[in-house]
Image: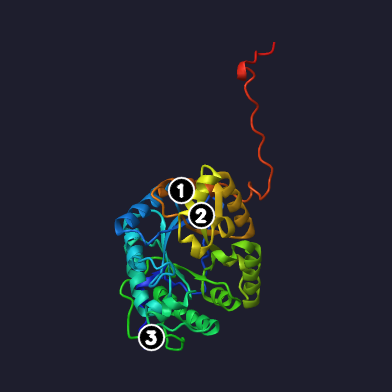
Amino acid sequence: MLASARRTDVRHANRVVQIDAFRPSTVPLGRLVRLGVVLDTRNPIGRIREIARMCDRAGIDAVWVRDHLAAPDGEPRVEAWTALAMAGAETERAVVGAVLDPSFRPPATLGAMAGTLDAAMGGRLELGFTAGWWEREHRDFGLAFPDTGARSATMEGYVRVVRQLLSGEPVTTSEPVELREAELGVASPQPGGPRVSIEALAPSQISVAVRVADDVLVPARSARDVEGAVARIRAVCEQEGRDPATMGVAMEVPVSVGRTESEAEVRARDEVLFDTIGHPAEVGIFGTLEQCQARVVELAHAGVSDLLCVVPNNPDVQDVIAQLTAIAVGTVDVLAPGAPKSKPPDPPTTWGGRRRSD
């Protein structure tokens, strides 16, 4: 049986925070959405550190990593948790998160790792979970790739165990996941543990997210119908008896921004990762800074509160990050999709050699 975490380590104001105290991601003041960058773990360790540090100093709200054991593009990658720890060490302000596959780590092991890392980073950790979309990645490592229904049941049990461990609740063997004798070594400093999201596309996956997660992570493939995806999430919330306002909606999107559309296209064309995720012009954010901001306005009004941006892994990525920080500036109260642009100021009366009128 799995031993519970030491409850005294996770008490806040003489109470133990329960799993059902959901904390959806919130949009920072003056932004349309919370803005995150997915670190490219194909890079050398030094480059991963550099970009994480760059994002933190540029004002990016969150940096993320994704689990990959055998990636669809065949490129080797730094192991996700290792990259996450490095990102945490290089940042001071930004949230540091990971989208993890439950198949790769036992829940008790992850609970101990997450509590320790969150304490080391001062409570900046967030955890995302994905059932995985690529069968070969599981088969190559001897991991089961169950059907959608079984995968959803396993995901729910896994996330419940991890959340219970990190919030100090007793854990039982009734969950449909393998439990081993373990105890949380260092408790998370966050009341209730780190915020949790679940990547969901199918209705059964959305239902699991509604029951146990703070946010739903919508895959980029749903970008063609964002309003429909958000409507489905809200409908499931109502079916499950959860207030839709307590469910955050995050979306992973490929992004290519440039000073011109041509520059954005060149950056996107050179990124082979977009062959797997999808072209930013089709399922993400693409074009000039103005065009990209217009797209973010659309996403924000559709109900997306959090963006996980996959940017081209180009040598000039720092320029992309700098422009990225500008596309989320504004609020939904002020900016609306398709709103007419402000009239540009008239030219000076003496511009072009014209004489000042008497």
- Earlier in the chain: of badge 1 and badge 2, it is 2
Res 77 seen here = yes
The N terminus is located in which quarter? Answer: bottom left
- Earlier in the chain: of badge 3 and badge 2, it is 3
Which residue carries the number 2 mark? 255
Q: CA distance from mark 3 to mark 2?
A: 39 Å
Which residue carries the number 3 mark? 179
> Residue, x 63% and y 47% (percent of image)?
335
- Discs 1, 2 touching: Cβ within 8 Å: yes
> Residue, x 68% and y 46% (percent of image)?
339
- Give the numbered dot on residue 320: 1
- Discs 3, 2 touching: Cβ within 8 Å: no
- Earlier in the chain: of badge 1 and badge 3, it is 3
- The percent position of residue 204, horizontal first and vertical second, equals 58, 79
- Crowding near pointer 3: few (<14 within 10 Å), some, many (20+)? many
Q: Amino acid at mark 2?
A: Val
In this view, the residue in front, 180 or 223, is: 223
Q: Amino acid at mark 3?
A: Leu
Is residue 160 toward the left or the right of residue 301 in the image? left
- Crowding near pointer 2: few (<14 within 10 Å), some, many (20+)? many
Q: CA distance from mark 1 to mark 2?
A: 9 Å
> Residue, x 55% and y 72% (percent of image)?
200
Q: Which secondary structure lies at badge 3?
A: loop
- The percent position of residue 342, horizontal first and vertical second, equals 66, 37
